[in-house]
Image (tube, rainbow, N blue to C red):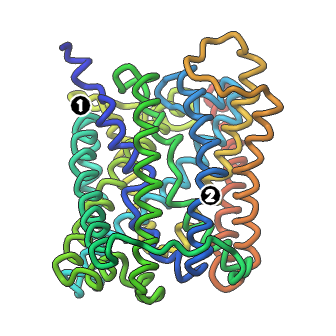
Amino acid sequence: MSVAAKRKLKPIQLAAVIFLTVSGGPYGLEPLLEQTGANASLLLLLLTPLAWDIPTIFTILELNSMMPVTGGYYQWVKRALGLRWAFYEGWWTWLYTFADLAIYPVLFVQYLSFFFPEAEAYKIPICLLVIWVSGGINILGIVPVGRTSLVLSVLVLIPFVLLFGWSMVQHNGHLVIPTPSLRQSNFSMVSLGLYTVMWNFIGWDNVTTYAEEVAKPVRSYLLSVLMAFVAVFCIYFLAVLIAINAGINATVLSETGFPSLGQLLGGKTLGAIIALGGMASALGLYSAVLLSVSRIPKVMSDDGLLPAKLHALHPRYKSPYVSILCCSIVVSGMVFWTFGELIIIDITLYGAALCLEYIALIRLRKIAAHDHRPFKIPLNRAGLALMALLPFTVYALALTGAFLNMEKALKPALFALATLCSAEVIWLLVQWRNKKKFAL
């Protein structure tokens, strides 16, 4: 095997990275029952993947099979819509991922506090340790991240396999499934719950930014995305169903997380195992998401949209180490936001970037109709437009609910919208800088 081949991800490693990029287990899903109630929670878990995830997965599989290149969605939008919209795509994605990354060290501290309650008092230094250790692993290259992700995925799944088994024993092999319904939930409650579910299902497009570093990328992505989606959906649904059947107080679950559910069902030992899984999940998610976002500044700097230094690769490990360091610095300053605020900022920015990817899909069907696509969605352009309406509707409902919820969601939603507008300001500054540089 050549040195280049050894530096590429294999399907099982890719599936683990995808699982951790998108999910990392149901950790972070705990507020859902308090936000919407049992019946609405199950309905959101059933419908959101169909309307929000399936269209996204089909889109990235087609575009990635057509253009399996470093930069993924940035490159697709650039070819379809031009450099300006590609800058929007890259800028929005970079910013939303900072919010996304900041969530995971905070979750790590939450689960660590199961063992050491005083950890909350040292939240910031612990978060910084997680950020910079993960950054160091990413600098070592994609294969160490893939191997680490594989181990962490196993550590994330085992606690919930044990939780499911213990719950089945306690309920004599039968779990009651409440009727999925929105009857007892108002629109404000559902919108907050929708943000929570959407956040737990985002990131499918992020895993395409390093496609050139994956062995046999077209086949590998098809297999790996399928494996990851099945794992994500099953573990989410089962975790919430177990919590409903256990009768745990929804507020307690929201505040203390799934370790409290484990402790309720199986005592301190099971709670500790789930807390360890939560810590592994936070570490794995952070490393996997950092892997994807660190490739975007590199390709943007190739096009003269960001400083050229971001293009620099590590002389030994060939990773974009300057980009990784810059990401780590910015995220270090974002861990002061609350978990709920970060989710709203995250989803608002992500949804806007995702809309550009759907437009790129439809546009490329016209301007690159004859390009080879090993995977092609069996719809014409009108059908693709109708498909894109599903996730857009979900996004619009969540955003509308955020603006109506003055107490919890308005401030981060307004901040996210201001951040979206910053793309045009930065674009104009970049154009001015480039013209000035050319004139000299």
Left or right: residue 110 compared with residue 251: left
Q: Where is residue 400 in the image (x, y as percent from the top left)?
A: 76, 68
Left or right: residue 127 compared with residue 360: left
Viewer-closest of 37 and 204:
37
Would residue 362 be seen by someone viewing this image from the given angle?
Answer: yes
Viewer-closest of 70 and 393:
393
| Residue type indicated by callout 2 | Thr
| Quadrant of the frame with the C terminus | top right
Q: Which of marks 2 and 1 is in front?
A: 2
Q: Where is residue 60 in the image (x, y as percent from the top left)?
A: 57, 34
* Quarter of the rendering containing residue 303: top right
Q: In this view, does 99 lie above or below 274?
A: above
Gap between marks 2 and 1 measured at Cα: 39 Å
Q: Position of residue 386 (x, y in %)?
A: 80, 40
| Residue type indicated by callout 1 | Tyr
Q: Residue 317 carries which label?
A: 1
Q: Position of residue 22 (x, y in %)?
A: 45, 51
Q: What element carries label 2?
A: helix
Viewer-closest of 4 and 330:
4
Q: In this view, does 158 lie above or below 383?
A: below
Would residue 129 be seen by someone viewing this image from the given angle?
Answer: no
| Residue at 34 percent of width and 77 percent of height | 171
Query: Which residue corresponds to mark 2?
Result: 48
* Quarter of the rendering containing residue 119: bottom left
Left or right: residue 204 compared with residue 149: right
| Residue at 65 percent of width and 63 percent of height | 416
